[in-house]
Amino acid sequence: MQSKSQPHKFSTSRSVNLSSTVVEQSEFTIHLANHWGMCFGVRDAISLAKEKAVDGKLTILGELVHNEVVRKKLRKAGAHEGDLSHLQAGTPEVLITAHGASDREKRRWAGLGHRVQDATCPLVKKAHTTLATLVAEGCFPVVIGQKGHAEVEGLIGDFPEAETLLTEEAIRELPSRQKFGIISQTTQPIEWVESLVAAFKKFHPHSEIIFRDTVCQPTKNRQRALDDLARRVGLLIVVGGSNSNNSRQLAEKAQRLGCRAERIAHAGEFDLKWLEGVESVGVTAGTSTLPSCVEKVIAQLESMGGTRVAR
Ligand code: SF4
């Protein structure tokens, strides 16, 4: 944080007064990614939750969206928040989030007498069906994904023997099987997933390796748009919550490509110091980020001397 008496130094031409902090500010361009922000799966889940929240009869089982503003609105509308692992909920209806849940968990909630509203994204459902088919074909199930993530827990919930992994080392240490059936968490970067499938072939040369690509198209679109953007800008801002896997993946990918990247949940988390020496700023957002959050970040960058450049 700069003090009022010692303005932060930039190579520049303009003064900005933000929250009583006066800084010398350079001019820079702002570039929005070709694909960014909220996907249809999260949007539809929010719509269903809004519709069912009235009368206070609904408990949302998990983090519907990694966005506190939306969650606050839903609570205000009457929705309660719970968790899939809870033993019960105090409302007649419960809602499965876009991340999905295992059939076992859905049956458990129905068995407790709750009406189960299912907002699982169709692309997550497709990953469930794909894994079930691989198991039915005699494969040992593997999910390339983050252990403990809600979507992954749902995917493996009906297959206790399934392995979840995210590194080459874990693949090397895995005992060989006759047939591995591999899918991926929907929000993993496809290049990383493919490199791990190649590692399976390398470390388990005598096993049959069957891979089904379940990374979702919205994630692929945002990742590919980032490839281009990260090479053109000096700083990349990813707007997304700290629990958002795909927002974190976008920031990590930009860093791997050699671009400085910062993830922020909202405009208030932006640090003016990041602009030092920067001539162009890229903006993208994860699949659970509201368009209004991104617009606020862009408006803030414009107030700091940025000029938005058409794509
Ligand atoms: Fe569906 Fe992909 Fe969005 Fe997840 S990130 S909700 S899988 S579209």
Image (cartoon, grey):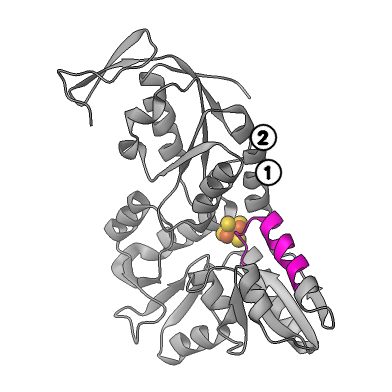
All told, the count of numbered labels is: 2
For residue 224, the mark is 1
Seen at 34% across and 56% down, the residue is 71
Amino acid type assigned to the residue bearing label 1 in the image? Arg
| View quadrant of ligand 1 | bottom right
Seen at 55% across and 81% down, the residue is 102
Q: CA distance from mark 1 to mark 2?
A: 7 Å
Q: For mark 1, does the 10 Å Cα neighbourhood hold few (<14), some (14 to 19), or many (20 or more) residues?
A: some
Answer whether residue 40 is magenta in the image: no
Does residue 87 sit above or below 60 in this rendering? below
Q: Quarter of the image holding residue 164? A: bottom right
Q: Nearer the viewer, residue 290 or 35?
A: 35
Residue corresponding to mark 2? 228
Seen at 45% across and 81% down, the residue is 115
Instruction: Work out which residue is located at the far top of the displayed protein and give it.
Output: 13
Amino acid type assigned to the residue bearing label 2 in the image? Asp
**Residue bounds of the magenta highlight:** 185-200
Seen at 65% across and 64% down, the residue is 123
Question: Percent position (x, y) of residue 297?
Answer: 40, 32
Q: Quarter of the image holding residue 255? A: top right
